[in-house]
Image (cartoon, rainbow, N blue to C red):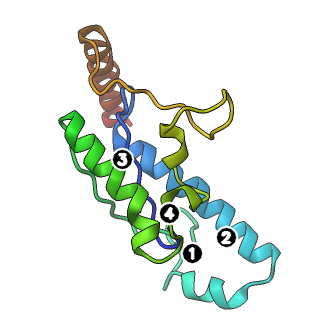
Amino acid sequence: MPDHFHLLANPLDLDISIIVGRIKGRTAVAVLGWLRTEGHSKSLTKLALPKRLKSGQTHAVWMREFSAIDIWSRRFIRQKLHYIHMNPVRAGLCKHPAEWHWSSYNAYFPHEPGGVPIEVDQRWVWTEDELNAARGRRTSALSKRKIK
């Protein structure tokens, strides 16, 4: 979407806020770099912060907040996938979700290997071993953050 993105993820190893933060950070650097290179000063002015942040950041592409919803069943996953895939159609950006270049829609149909940008993990729950390992890594990561 031109002004937001949707992500359906089951991050075994990381907190979702870390994943979203990395996506937003990397895309912001790319967008701002492109705007500067191409001389889009009007757009840069719109993205300028009122004052420089402690980090040195002078512009903001994304809002700080994001919305996360816990998904707890196969039916809920299908509902959210349908919502995500139909979003550009509802916005009038295309007539069919398969036409939206940045959509995962085509990944959910039989395809030639390497023919789509992602491979879909059809599992919707973790095994007990995966869950216990993730809990251990998350506890370790959180305690490292508290130490700093």
Estimate how packed mark 1 is, as few (under 14), some (14 to 19) or many (20 or more) residues with alpha carbons within 10 Å. Answer: some
Q: Quadrant of the C terminus?
A: top left
Does label 4 or label 2 sit earlier along the sequence? Answer: 2
Does label 2 or label 3 sit earlier along the sequence? Answer: 3
Residue 17, label in figure: 3
Q: Choose between 138 and 123: the one closer to the eye.
A: 123
Q: In the image, what residue type sits under mark 1?
A: His
Q: Place residue 66 in its image quadrant.
A: bottom left
Residue positioned 45% across, 60% down in the render: 5
- Secondary structure beneath dot 3 equals helix
Residue where numbered disc 1 is placed: 59
Q: Is residue 146 visible?
A: yes
Residue positioned 57% across, 68% down in the render: 57
Does label 4 or label 1 sit earlier along the sequence? Answer: 1
Q: In the image, what residue type sits under mark 2?
A: Leu
Q: In the image, what residue type sits under mark 4?
A: His
